[in-house]
Image (cartoon, helix red, strand yellow):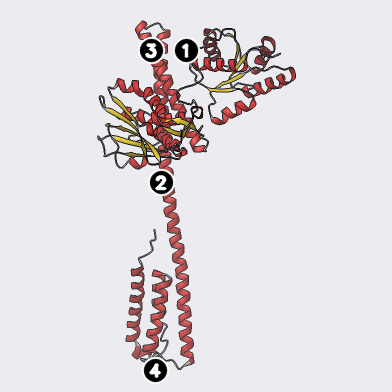
Amino acid sequence: MYTLPSKSSRYFVAIAATAVVFTFRFLLKSVLGDVAPLLMFTLSVMAAAWYGGLGPGLLSTALGALLGDYFFIEPFYSFRIYNHAEMIEEGLFLGIGTSISILSQARLSLLEKRRQLLVSEQDARCAAEDANRLKDEFLSTVSHELRTPLTAINGWALMMRAGRLNAAQSVRALETIVRSAKSQNQLINDLLDVSRIIAGKLRLDVAPLKLGLVIEAAIDTVRPAAAAKGIQLSALLDPAADTISGDAERLQQVVWNLLSNAVKFAPNGGRVEVILKRADSRVEITVADNGQGINPEFLPYVFERFRQEHGGTNRQQGGLGLGLAIVRHIVELHGGTVRVASEGLGKGATFTVALPAAQDRAMSPHEFRDNTPGRSLEPPNPPSLVGIRALFVDDEADAREIITMMLAGSGAEVRTASSAPEALAACDEWRPEILIADIGMPGEDGYTLMKKLRALEKLRGGHIPAIALTAYARQEDRLRALSVGYELHVPKPIEPDELLGAVASLANRTGKDEEFK
């Protein structure tokens, strides 16, 4: 690959080539006299311009004209020219030298551009190869992380079905199945969040909130995992840094991710500290541990998607390498920053989230939205659904069975349908008070079902409150479900109490006298 020489070497070659040509021409002066005094200097111009481009070529041209005029054109040893033919010859030499220099510069510019294109192409190829490698590693990691809980779920379920477990083992099996299912759900949520981040569709539900409550909720979530490893989990929360504006659920996700990482990498019997404090016009959340630390070479890549310090099949910790990338994006959406510090391997790590503080003014209680994370539609005790007629629509028999058990166990009268036409017929005949429908169904999906139901209601009167219970969990899926007439969009998988709370909340809000007529 051609590389342009340094500036000093290019001009040195121009001077050296002119000196060599001058020496030969001087030695031949006795033979040639004043015949073609400048012709040989064309060689030095060509050499200088070919090697160095425009500047060295012009320098060689100027030096050749001066030396030729002084030494080889009469009167010798003078810069005066009286012969018109020699004046024309010198003019031609200057023109030819300038042309050669310009053409050589164009050639060198093309070579430099070609070199830059080659470097750019090589960089792009390396980046593509690196991206492909990361993609392959990520897909392999996804497969591993999804199969691992599936193995536990499938194995324990098969042993329970075969009747090979005693009472204590059955309890342990159920706990493992629930834990594994939640682990899978968290992996899927992380993948969806990254998809929203890449598409620029991750949105915040901003309201005034108490940051201390958000942090305490996240601590409560990871406390069992910390206790299992004997980790001392401490929190120092400054009340002066408590009030900010933000999305409570997303901020809990940030703190939970940082705490989960700290607990995961801290040694048995280690410690994890959470500090909330005010720093000028910002509030800072610091999560520190005394775990294995971070290699200084990896620190710049900590918050990149799909990057893990120890990848491959011999990695010591699980996960997809998405949590910290999600943390950074959520924090930046709040107008904040996140940074990491580690003194090296074995010396722990400290993550610091800085968020804009709320304006220093008193806020009335009604300004604070009750959006403390972890709260959903379900009350602490499962609600009673006695007397509520609920119709559940799903093409999957297993889903119909489990949802029916959830609703009937709380006293609801439940009927099921496996398709949109069957559901419309049940609405006309049975008049349910609540409709719960899946979205993805063969033939007519849940969107079509709701459009037809709302159209019939306009003709006949009445209104059936409806919940979309679906595995389509993106923000655009939620907005589409609400736009066609569903009152609530609830993503799968769902906790029983959450479903019962949603049904009770919707029934209480709409009343029981608005039947489909």
- For disc 3, the marked residue is 173
Query: What secondary structure is found at the residue carrying circle 1?
Result: loop
- For disc 1, the marked residue is 381
- Residue 397 placement (x, y as % from top left): 56, 13
Is the residue marked by circle 4 packed among few (<14), some (14-19), or many (20+) residues within 10 Å? Answer: some
Give the foreground label among 2 and 1: 1
Question: Which of the two labelled residues, at mark 2 and mark 1, occupies the earlier sequence position?
Answer: 2
Query: What secondary structure is found at the residue carrying circle 4?
Result: loop
Is the residue marked by circle 1 packed among few (<14), some (14-19), or many (20+) residues within 10 Å? Answer: few
- For disc 4, the marked residue is 75
- Residue 27 placement (x, y as % from top left): 32, 86
Q: Amino acid at mark 3?
A: Ala
Reply above or below: 118 against 194: below
Alpha-carbon span between mark 2 and mark 3: 47 Å
Task: Verify CB contact (< 8 Å) between mark 3 and mark 1.
Answer: no
- For disc 2, the marked residue is 126
Question: Which of the two labelled residues, at mark 4 and mark 1, occupies the earlier sequence position?
Answer: 4
Alpha-carbon span between mark 3 and mark 4: 111 Å
- Residue appearing at x 65%, y 22% in the figure: 450
Q: Nearer the viewer, residue 455 or 250?
A: 250
Reply above or below: 261 against 96: above
Alpha-carbon span between mark 2 and mark 1: 57 Å
Question: Which of the two labelled residues, at mark 3 and mark 4, occupies the earlier sequence position?
Answer: 4
Residue 40 in view of the camera: no
Q: Amino acid at mark 2?
A: Cys
Residue 301 in view of the camera: yes
- Residue 257 placement (x, y as % from top left): 39, 30
Give the foreground label among 4 and 1: 1
Alpha-carbon span between mark 4 and mark 1: 116 Å
Instruction: Report which quarter residue 65 is drawn in.
Output: bottom left
Query: What secondary structure is found at the residue carrying circle 2?
Result: helix
Instruction: Report which quarter residue 45 is drawn in.
Output: bottom left
